[in-house]
């Protein structure tokens, strides 16, 4: 049996259409255009693509996008000055500093400096604390997108065993935090696996919902998946593959693959996200959602 596809791209489009309507209504009511400032330091090619996607999505949703592209030679002091300026700017509602930052820049110091009311990534300790206590201001974009995907496909999470592979601050930890909360898309029993987990494959096989976020190409193999499990792949790994071309010669091609061996795992799982077209588009979508929320909060606080 082949798993059904959890269509992240289609779901993202549907949510973005809802957000666009809400943005239009918000602008008509308040005269305020939700604005996201995105800061990219350096030349990382993947980050450049992500940032461009965020900018395009913002504009399409009727929001304003301010892009700050800074050289890799930018100093901590220069970046601090920019963040402080954006914090003070009342026309800016969301601030996102694209990670990873180039070596030499103090990621923690920079992220801690972002006004928590403008922290649309939900990386600030104050926002992480609020999530942990079950009273979130913003929800982190990738875990929030995954939760929305499960909810919209009416995949039950209450009482289910969820196994998250990966303990990053961006995905693994906040994913676990969301799934253990009370309410729709939560109430799960969650295990987080990582590089020091003993018998990881065995733990993964206990999952009703398996979420792979470790950044290792095709790490999750069919034997690590319980038959009928729901598999969510957060991985975006660029790999070189050798293919035989039309002339019969070996050719190296660059390919995007997830953390899950899709071709094999789809024969075991009941539902699966593809890469690309799975989780990726949802991350950007929830960023739009958070930016609108930040604008609402700021207008309310005036
Ligand atoms: N780099 C990879 N994912 C993310 C994300 O969700 N937010 C930011 N700011 N940087 C990232």
Image (cartoon, rainbow, N blue to C red):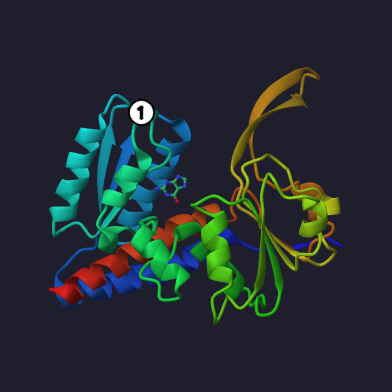
* Residue 247 in picture, x, y percent from top left: 77, 19
Q: Residue at image x 34%, y 37%?
A: 106
Q: Is residue 298 left or right of residue 165?
A: left
Residue at coordinates 62% horizontally, 50% vertically from top-left?
Answer: 166
**217 sits to left or right of 126:** right
Residue 233: x %, y % from top left: 65, 53
Viewer can see residue 9: no
User: Where, by quadrant of the figure, is residue 31 drawn?
Assistant: bottom left
Which element type, helix, strand or loop, lies under badge 1? loop
Task: Look at the image and tell me in which quarter the N terminus lies.
Answer: bottom right
Above or below: residue 135 compared with residue 124: below
Q: How many marks?
A: 1
Q: Give whichever of 254, 179 is nearer the camera.
A: 179
Residue in the image at 56% along x and 80% along y: 184
Which residue appears at 57% of the width and 55% of the height? 172
Give the answer, above or below, for where 42 lies relative to 146: above
Residue 19 seen in the current view: yes
Circle 1 is placed at which residue position?
A: 104
Label 1 crowd bin: few (<14), some (14–19), many (20+), radius 10 Å: few
Residue 234, compared with residue 293, is above or below; it is above
- The C terminus lies in quadrant: bottom left
Name the spot of residue 211 as percent of width and height, x first.
66, 58
Residue 200, how many percent across, how many down? Answer: 77, 51
* Residue 282 relative to residue 90: left or right: right
Q: Is mark 1 within 8 Å of ligand 1?
A: no
């Amino acid at each position: 049996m082949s798993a059904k596809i959890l269509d992240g791209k289609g779901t993202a489009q549907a949510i973005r259409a809802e957000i666009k309507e809400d943005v239009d209504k918000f602008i008509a009511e308040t005269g305020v255009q939700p604005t996201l400032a995105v800061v990219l330091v350096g030349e990382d090619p993947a980050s450049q693509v992500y940032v461009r996607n965020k900018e395009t999505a913002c504009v399409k949703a009727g929001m304003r996008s301010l892009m700050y592209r800074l050289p890799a030679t930018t100093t901590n002091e220069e970046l601090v000055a920019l963040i402080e300026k954006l914090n003070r700017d009342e026309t800016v509602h969301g601030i996102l500093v694209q990670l990873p930052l180039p070596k030499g820049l103090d990621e923690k110091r920079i992220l801690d400096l972002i006004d928590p009311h403008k922290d649309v990534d939900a990386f600030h300790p104050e926002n992480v604390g609020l999530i942990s206590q079950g009273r979130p201001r913003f929800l982190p974009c990738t875990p929030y997108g995954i939760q929305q995907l499960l909810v919209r496909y009416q995949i039950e999470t209450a009482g289910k065993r969820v196994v998250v592979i990966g303990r990053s601050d961006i995905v693994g930890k906040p994913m676990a935090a969301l799934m253990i909360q009370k309410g729709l898309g939560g109430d799960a029993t969650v295990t987080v696996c990582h590089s020091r987990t003993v018998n990881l494959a065995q733990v993964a096989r206990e999952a009703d919902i398996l979420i792979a976020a470790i950044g290792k190409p095709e790490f999750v193999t069919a034997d690590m998946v319980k038959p009928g499990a729901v598999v969510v792949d957060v991985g975006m790994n660029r790999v070189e593959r050798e293919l035989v071309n039309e002339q019969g010669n070996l050719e190296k091609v660059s390919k995007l693959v997830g953390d899950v061996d899709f071709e094999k795992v789809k024969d075991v799982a009941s539902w699966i996200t593809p890469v690309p077209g799975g989780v990726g588009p949802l991350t950007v979508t929830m960023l739009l959602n958070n930016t609108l929320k930040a604008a609402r909060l700021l207008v309310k606080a005036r």
